[in-house]
């Protein structure tokens, strides 16, 4: 009987699957990574701040959880402002923040603001990469959600679907497209809130490489 039990124990040990020795690597979060609201709506990540995401206010209301690719939880929205919202990353095992823009090479090394007349580029989901110049700063714009002050106007054209496109100059993050007037056929202008103002207001630190 004792011999039979020993044989059965050896057979079970031989057929049982081995425990995994490695875990799945975290998924990168980049500027432009697609995100999803609690009810499946789509939004997008902005430039990463340490431990937090800067996202459009359309991502949801305070307390709702934002998800990433494959609908994996990232964390809850902890603040909603007129032009942006803040997500705190609580599922840290699943995600790793990168100082990069989705679909583009190069690393974000800082957020030095581009002066008037300087070149800025936007990486839009609809139009792809578009570049132009900074036309004016501290511009006031009337949005349906309210009046917004201190925006930067550029000559970068936008199309529907380009909202929240990362705007940058070389390796320097500038902000996120809030839309504009005109289109890429007839020309037009677009606006963004300077990223440094958001970082300062929310006491966040930009993820850089």
Image (cartoon, helix red, strand yellow):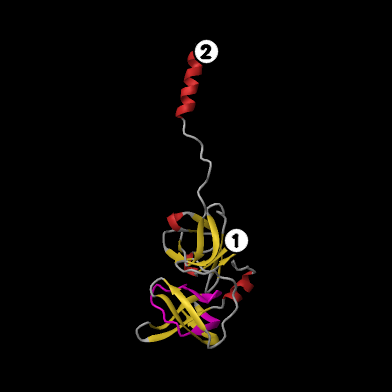
* Relative depth, front residue between 180 and 108: 108
Question: For residue 170: magenta?
Answer: yes
Disc 2 element: helix
Asked if one can make out residue 144 in the rendered structure from this viewpoint, the answer is no
Asked if one can make out residue 53 in the rendered structure from this viewpoint, the answer is yes
* Relative depth, front residue between 48 and 20: 20
On the image, the x and y values in percent for residue 98 come to: 54, 63
Q: Name the residue under label 1.
A: 51
Q: In which quarter of the image is the C terminus?
A: bottom right
In the rendered structure, the answer to whether residue 127 lies left or right of residue 171 reads: left
Q: How far apart are marks 2 and 1 (CA)?
A: 57 Å
CB-based contact (under 8 Å), mark 2 and mark 1: no
Mark seen at residue 101: none
Residue that protrudes farthest toward the left in the picture: 185
Q: Name the residue under label 2.
A: 2
Query: Which class describes the residues within 10 Å of circle 1: few (<14), some (14-19), or many (20+)?
Result: some
**Part of the protein shown in magenta:** 147-175
Query: Which class describes the residues within 10 Å of circle 2: few (<14), some (14-19), or many (20+)?
Result: few
Disc 1 element: loop
Which residue does the image show at 52% across and 74% down from the upper left?
83
Which residue does the image show at 55% across and 71% down from the upper left?
81
On the image, the x and y values in percent for residue 61 come to: 51, 64
Question: For residue 101: magenta?
Answer: no
Disc 2 or 1, which lies upstream in sequence?
2
Which residue does the image show at 49% across and 27% down from the upper left?
13
């Amino acid at each position: 009987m004792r011999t039979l039990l020993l044989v059965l124990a050896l057979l079970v040990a031989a057929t049982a699957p081995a425990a995994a020795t490695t875990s799945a690597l975290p998924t990168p979060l980049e500027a432009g990574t697609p995100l999803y609201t609690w009810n499946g709506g789509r939004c997008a990540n902005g430039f990463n701040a340490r431990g937090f995401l800067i996202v459009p206010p359309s991502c949801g209301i305070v307390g709702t959880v934002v998800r990433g690719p494959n609908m994996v939880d990232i964390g809850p929205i902890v603040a909603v402002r007129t032009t942006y919202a803040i997500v705190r990353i609580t599922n840290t095992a699943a995600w790793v923040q990168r100082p990069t823009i989705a679909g583009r090479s190069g690393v974000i090394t800082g957020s030095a603001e581009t002066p008037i007349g300087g070149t800025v580029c936007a990486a839009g989901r609809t139009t792809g990469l578009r570049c132009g110049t900074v036309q004016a700063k501290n511009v006031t714009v009337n949005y349906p959600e309210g009046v917004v002050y201190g925006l930067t106007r550029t000559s970068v054209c936008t199309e529907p679907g380009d909202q929240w496109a990362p705007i940058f100059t070389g390796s320097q993050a500038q902000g996120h497209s809030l839309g504009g007037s005109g289109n890429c056929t007839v020309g037009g202008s677009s606006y963004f809130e300077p990223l440094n103002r958001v970082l300062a207001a929310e006491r966040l630190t930009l993820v850089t490489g």
